[in-house]
Amino acid sequence: MALTAPPGGRSIFSPATVRERAENFENYWVYLRHRDGELLEAERALANKQPVLARFQEHPVRSRRPLAAPERFYRNYVTMRDDPRTLDRTTLLLTFLYKFARHEWVGISAAWDATPTLADSEHLTDKISRYHLAEEFGHMRLFHEMFETFRLDRVEWVPLPNWVKQVYSVFTRMPPALMSSAAFVTELMGFTVYLHLDKILDETLADEPEARERVRGLLHEIAVDELGHVGLRRNYMGPVGRRVAKRMVRPMFHAFFHSMPEASLLFDIRRMVKDAEGFDYATIPPEMLRGAWVPSYFWRRP
Ligand SMILES: [Fe+2]
Ligand SMILES: [Fe+2]
Protein backbone atom coordinates (compact mmCIF):
# COMPACT_ATOMS: atom_id res chain seq x y z
CA MET A 1 0.00 0.00 0.00
CA ALA A 2 1.46 3.33 -1.03
CA LEU A 3 2.04 5.84 1.71
CA THR A 4 2.86 9.47 1.18
CA ALA A 5 3.91 12.21 3.53
CA PRO A 6 1.13 14.62 4.40
CA PRO A 7 1.44 17.98 2.63
CA GLY A 8 3.84 20.17 4.55
CA GLY A 9 5.06 17.13 6.45
CA ARG A 10 4.73 16.68 10.15
CA SER A 11 7.00 17.80 12.91
CA ILE A 12 8.68 15.10 14.98
CA PHE A 13 7.05 16.80 17.98
CA SER A 14 3.52 16.22 16.62
CA PRO A 15 1.16 14.27 18.91
CA ALA A 16 0.28 10.58 18.70
CA THR A 17 -2.26 8.54 20.66
CA VAL A 18 -1.32 5.84 23.17
CA ARG A 19 -2.79 3.24 20.82
CA GLU A 20 -0.82 4.49 17.82
CA ARG A 21 2.34 4.33 19.85
CA ALA A 22 1.66 0.79 21.01
CA GLU A 23 1.03 -0.31 17.41
CA ASN A 24 4.22 1.36 16.31
CA PHE A 25 6.39 -0.62 18.71
CA GLU A 26 4.96 -3.72 17.04
CA ASN A 27 5.61 -2.28 13.57
CA TYR A 28 9.15 -1.37 14.41
CA TRP A 29 9.86 -4.83 15.74
CA VAL A 30 8.62 -6.42 12.50
CA TYR A 31 10.71 -3.95 10.51
CA LEU A 32 13.85 -4.63 12.59
CA ARG A 33 13.76 -8.38 12.23
CA HIS A 34 13.12 -8.13 8.53
CA ARG A 35 15.83 -5.55 7.91
CA ASP A 36 18.54 -6.73 10.31
CA GLY A 37 17.95 -10.49 10.32
CA GLU A 38 19.13 -12.62 13.21
CA LEU A 39 20.84 -11.01 16.20
CA LEU A 40 24.22 -12.58 16.95
CA GLU A 41 24.70 -12.00 20.68
CA ALA A 42 28.33 -13.12 20.93
CA GLU A 43 29.42 -10.85 18.08
CA ARG A 44 27.07 -7.99 19.07
CA ALA A 45 26.13 -8.03 15.41
CA LEU A 46 23.22 -8.57 13.02
CA ALA A 47 23.13 -11.22 10.31
CA ASN A 48 21.92 -8.91 7.53
CA LYS A 49 24.40 -6.17 8.40
CA GLN A 50 27.46 -8.41 8.14
CA PRO A 51 27.38 -8.63 4.32
CA VAL A 52 27.08 -4.84 4.09
CA LEU A 53 30.28 -4.40 6.10
CA ALA A 54 31.98 -7.20 4.16
CA ARG A 55 31.13 -5.45 0.89
CA PHE A 56 32.91 -2.31 2.05
CA GLN A 57 35.89 -4.28 3.35
CA GLU A 58 36.24 -6.42 0.23
CA HIS A 59 36.25 -3.33 -1.98
CA PRO A 60 38.44 -1.01 0.02
CA VAL A 61 38.87 2.62 -1.00
CA ARG A 62 41.93 4.46 0.25
CA SER A 63 42.63 8.17 0.09
CA ARG A 64 44.92 9.17 -2.79
CA ARG A 65 47.37 10.76 -0.41
CA PRO A 66 47.99 10.03 3.25
CA LEU A 67 47.09 12.84 5.63
CA ALA A 68 49.56 15.71 5.56
CA ALA A 69 50.58 14.90 9.13
CA PRO A 70 48.97 11.72 10.49
CA GLU A 71 50.72 12.25 13.82
CA ARG A 72 48.58 15.35 14.31
CA PHE A 73 45.49 13.16 13.99
CA TYR A 74 46.84 10.72 16.57
CA ARG A 75 47.83 13.53 18.93
CA ASN A 76 44.38 15.11 18.83
CA TYR A 77 41.84 12.42 18.14
CA VAL A 78 41.09 11.39 21.72
CA THR A 79 41.70 14.81 23.27
CA MET A 80 42.31 18.00 21.33
CA ARG A 81 45.79 19.06 22.38
CA ASP A 82 46.68 21.50 19.62
CA ASP A 83 44.78 24.63 18.68
CA PRO A 84 42.09 23.06 16.45
CA ARG A 85 42.25 26.09 14.13
CA THR A 86 45.74 24.98 13.10
CA LEU A 87 44.55 21.57 11.86
CA ASP A 88 43.75 21.02 8.19
CA ARG A 89 40.06 20.44 7.43
CA THR A 90 40.40 16.72 6.70
CA THR A 91 42.14 16.03 9.99
CA LEU A 92 39.61 18.21 11.80
CA LEU A 93 36.76 16.23 10.26
CA LEU A 94 38.35 12.91 11.20
CA THR A 95 39.10 13.88 14.80
CA PHE A 96 35.50 15.08 15.08
CA LEU A 97 34.17 11.79 13.69
CA TYR A 98 36.21 9.90 16.22
CA LYS A 99 35.03 11.96 19.19
CA PHE A 100 31.43 11.72 18.04
CA ALA A 101 31.63 7.96 17.54
CA ARG A 102 33.45 7.47 20.81
CA HIS A 103 30.56 8.93 22.77
CA GLU A 104 28.28 6.43 21.07
CA TRP A 105 30.67 3.60 21.78
CA VAL A 106 30.86 4.39 25.48
CA GLY A 107 27.08 4.75 25.75
CA ILE A 108 26.30 1.51 23.95
CA SER A 109 28.99 -0.52 25.71
CA ALA A 110 27.48 0.41 29.10
CA ALA A 111 23.94 -0.17 27.84
CA TRP A 112 24.77 -3.58 26.30
CA ASP A 113 25.86 -4.87 29.72
CA ALA A 114 22.75 -3.42 31.39
CA THR A 115 20.09 -4.78 28.95
CA PRO A 116 18.82 -8.36 28.88
CA THR A 117 19.89 -10.60 26.03
CA LEU A 118 17.29 -11.26 23.37
CA ALA A 119 16.56 -14.68 24.86
CA ASP A 120 16.06 -13.15 28.32
CA SER A 121 13.93 -10.24 27.12
CA GLU A 122 10.39 -10.25 28.45
CA HIS A 123 9.11 -7.01 27.00
CA LEU A 124 8.95 -6.05 23.37
CA THR A 125 10.82 -2.84 24.15
CA ASP A 126 13.71 -4.88 25.63
CA LYS A 127 13.97 -6.90 22.42
CA ILE A 128 13.93 -3.71 20.39
CA SER A 129 16.65 -2.22 22.62
CA ARG A 130 18.87 -5.25 22.08
CA TYR A 131 18.57 -4.93 18.28
CA HIS A 132 19.00 -1.21 18.51
CA LEU A 133 22.30 -1.65 20.40
CA ALA A 134 23.51 -4.28 17.94
CA GLU A 135 22.88 -1.75 15.15
CA GLU A 136 24.97 0.80 17.05
CA PHE A 137 27.86 -1.66 17.37
CA GLY A 138 27.62 -2.15 13.63
CA HIS A 139 27.99 1.60 13.23
CA MET A 140 31.29 1.48 15.14
CA ARG A 141 32.59 -0.97 12.54
CA LEU A 142 31.52 1.40 9.78
CA PHE A 143 33.24 4.31 11.53
CA HIS A 144 36.37 2.19 11.69
CA GLU A 145 36.20 1.82 7.92
CA MET A 146 36.15 5.61 7.58
CA PHE A 147 39.46 5.84 9.41
CA GLU A 148 40.89 2.99 7.33
CA THR A 149 39.81 4.90 4.24
CA PHE A 150 42.17 7.66 5.35
CA ARG A 151 44.91 5.13 6.12
CA LEU A 152 44.50 5.57 9.86
CA ASP A 153 44.84 2.01 11.09
CA ARG A 154 45.92 2.67 14.65
CA VAL A 155 42.61 4.08 15.91
CA GLU A 156 41.55 2.66 19.26
CA TRP A 157 38.30 3.09 21.13
CA VAL A 158 39.47 4.67 24.36
CA PRO A 159 37.11 4.67 27.36
CA LEU A 160 35.84 8.06 28.50
CA PRO A 161 37.06 9.49 31.79
CA ASN A 162 35.17 8.37 34.87
CA TRP A 163 33.39 11.67 35.43
CA VAL A 164 31.79 11.46 31.99
CA LYS A 165 30.71 7.90 32.69
CA GLN A 166 29.09 9.13 35.88
CA VAL A 167 27.18 11.74 33.89
CA TYR A 168 25.97 8.96 31.60
CA SER A 169 24.87 6.86 34.53
CA VAL A 170 22.73 9.77 35.79
CA PHE A 171 20.74 9.26 32.58
CA THR A 172 19.84 5.72 33.50
CA ARG A 173 18.52 6.84 36.90
CA MET A 174 16.34 9.65 35.56
CA PRO A 175 12.55 9.39 35.92
CA PRO A 176 11.27 7.49 32.84
CA ALA A 177 9.58 10.55 31.25
CA LEU A 178 12.75 12.61 31.44
CA MET A 179 14.91 9.70 30.39
CA SER A 180 12.88 9.04 27.25
CA SER A 181 13.09 12.73 26.32
CA ALA A 182 16.86 12.79 26.82
CA ALA A 183 17.30 9.56 24.85
CA PHE A 184 15.19 11.00 22.05
CA VAL A 185 17.22 14.22 21.89
CA THR A 186 20.43 12.17 21.77
CA GLU A 187 19.19 10.31 18.69
CA LEU A 188 17.89 13.51 17.12
CA MET A 189 21.29 15.08 17.69
CA GLY A 190 23.03 12.12 16.08
CA PHE A 191 20.83 12.25 13.02
CA THR A 192 21.21 16.03 12.70
CA VAL A 193 24.99 15.53 12.70
CA TYR A 194 24.68 13.06 9.79
CA LEU A 195 22.63 15.54 7.78
CA HIS A 196 25.14 18.31 8.40
CA LEU A 197 28.14 16.05 7.77
CA ASP A 198 26.76 15.20 4.36
CA LYS A 199 26.58 18.90 3.55
CA ILE A 200 30.24 19.62 4.41
CA LEU A 201 31.79 16.53 2.79
CA ASP A 202 32.08 18.02 -0.72
CA GLU A 203 33.96 21.04 0.46
CA THR A 204 36.01 19.35 3.19
CA LEU A 205 37.19 16.40 1.11
CA ALA A 206 37.32 18.12 -2.27
CA ASP A 207 40.76 16.67 -3.11
CA GLU A 208 39.76 13.10 -2.33
CA PRO A 209 36.69 12.31 -4.44
CA GLU A 210 36.84 8.51 -4.06
CA ALA A 211 37.49 8.58 -0.32
CA ARG A 212 34.79 11.22 0.05
CA GLU A 213 32.19 9.04 -1.67
CA ARG A 214 33.22 6.07 0.42
CA VAL A 215 32.81 8.07 3.63
CA ARG A 216 29.47 9.32 2.33
CA GLY A 217 28.35 5.75 1.66
CA LEU A 218 29.41 4.60 5.13
CA LEU A 219 27.66 7.54 6.78
CA HIS A 220 24.55 6.82 4.74
CA GLU A 221 24.36 3.25 6.06
CA ILE A 222 24.45 4.62 9.59
CA ALA A 223 22.07 7.51 8.97
CA VAL A 224 19.25 5.28 7.71
CA ASP A 225 19.33 3.30 10.98
CA GLU A 226 19.59 6.48 13.00
CA LEU A 227 16.54 7.93 11.30
CA GLY A 228 14.70 4.84 12.51
CA HIS A 229 16.05 5.42 16.02
CA VAL A 230 14.68 8.99 15.97
CA GLY A 231 11.21 7.65 15.15
CA LEU A 232 11.50 4.88 17.71
CA ARG A 233 12.56 7.28 20.44
CA ARG A 234 9.75 9.63 19.48
CA ASN A 235 7.39 6.73 19.99
CA TYR A 236 8.33 6.42 23.67
CA MET A 237 7.15 9.93 24.48
CA GLY A 238 3.75 11.11 25.62
CA PRO A 239 2.62 14.77 25.61
CA VAL A 240 4.81 15.80 28.57
CA GLY A 241 7.87 14.02 27.22
CA ARG A 242 7.45 15.75 23.86
CA ARG A 243 7.34 19.19 25.42
CA VAL A 244 10.33 18.45 27.65
CA ALA A 245 12.28 17.08 24.68
CA LYS A 246 11.72 20.19 22.62
CA ARG A 247 13.10 22.33 25.42
CA MET A 248 16.07 20.02 25.89
CA VAL A 249 17.28 20.31 22.29
CA ARG A 250 19.13 23.59 22.66
CA PRO A 251 20.93 22.97 25.98
CA MET A 252 21.81 19.37 25.12
CA PHE A 253 23.21 20.30 21.70
CA HIS A 254 25.27 23.13 23.15
CA ALA A 255 26.62 21.00 26.01
CA PHE A 256 27.53 18.13 23.70
CA PHE A 257 29.24 20.19 21.02
CA HIS A 258 30.97 22.33 23.60
CA SER A 259 32.90 19.20 24.60
CA MET A 260 34.28 18.88 21.05
CA PRO A 261 36.37 21.83 19.93
CA GLU A 262 36.11 20.70 16.30
CA ALA A 263 32.33 21.08 16.17
CA SER A 264 32.02 24.86 15.98
CA LEU A 265 34.78 25.01 13.35
CA LEU A 266 33.03 22.49 11.12
CA PHE A 267 29.36 23.21 11.71
CA ASP A 268 26.89 25.98 12.30
CA ILE A 269 25.64 24.77 15.69
CA ARG A 270 22.78 27.26 15.83
CA ARG A 271 21.55 25.97 12.47
CA MET A 272 21.75 22.43 13.82
CA VAL A 273 19.62 23.37 16.81
CA LYS A 274 17.07 25.04 14.53
CA ASP A 275 17.00 22.03 12.19
CA ALA A 276 16.48 19.65 15.09
CA GLU A 277 13.72 21.77 16.65
CA GLY A 278 12.05 21.96 13.25
CA PHE A 279 12.66 18.30 12.31
CA ASP A 280 10.06 17.32 9.76
CA TYR A 281 10.04 14.09 7.75
CA ALA A 282 9.00 16.01 4.65
CA THR A 283 12.41 17.71 4.58
CA ILE A 284 14.52 14.53 4.85
CA PRO A 285 16.31 13.63 1.61
CA PRO A 286 14.37 10.82 -0.12
CA GLU A 287 17.46 8.60 -0.36
CA MET A 288 17.66 8.58 3.43
CA LEU A 289 13.95 7.98 3.90
CA ARG A 290 14.11 4.99 1.60
CA GLY A 291 14.61 1.96 3.81
CA ALA A 292 14.26 3.92 7.04
CA TRP A 293 11.54 3.33 9.59
CA VAL A 294 9.05 6.12 10.19
CA PRO A 295 6.24 5.89 12.77
CA SER A 296 2.88 5.42 11.06
CA TYR A 297 1.46 8.64 12.49
CA PHE A 298 3.82 10.64 10.30
CA TRP A 299 2.30 9.17 7.17
CA ARG A 300 -1.13 9.42 5.67
CA ARG A 301 -2.78 7.15 3.16
CA PRO A 302 -3.54 9.00 -0.10
FE1 LIG B 1 24.18 5.84 16.88
FE1 LIG C 1 21.01 5.59 17.34
Image (cartoon, grey):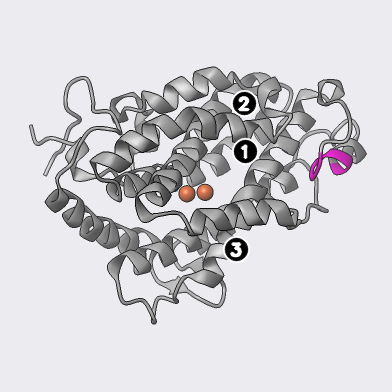
Relative horizontal placement of residue 226, taking residue 145 as reference (left or right): left
Q: Is 173 covered by the magenta stretch?
A: no
Q: Foreground residue, 197 or 234?
A: 234
Residue 162 position within the rendered picture, expressed as x and y whole percent measured from the top left: 73, 57
Q: Amino acid at mark 1?
A: Val
* Looking at the image, residue 90 lies above or below residue 35: above
Label 2 residue SS: helix
How would you rate the neighbour count of disc 1 (Cα within 10 Å): few for under 14, some for 14-19, many for 20 or more? many
Total numbered labels: 3
Q: Please tell me which residue lies in front, 58 or 86.
A: 86
Q: Is residue 174 among what the camera can see? A: yes
Disc on the earlier residue, 1 or 2: 2
Q: Are marks 1 and 2 in contact (CB under 8 Å)?
A: yes
Give the vertical position of 211 relative to 7 (above or below). below
Labels 1 and 3: the sequence-earlier one: 3
Write down the region rendered in magenta: 74-79
Q: Nearer the viewer, mark 1 or mark 3?
A: 3
Q: Is residue 78 magenta?
A: yes
For mark 2, what is the residue?
A: 201
Which residue is painted at 49% across and 43% down in the image?
A: 186
Give the percent coordinates (x, y) of residue 31: 28, 57
- Disc 1: which residue: 215
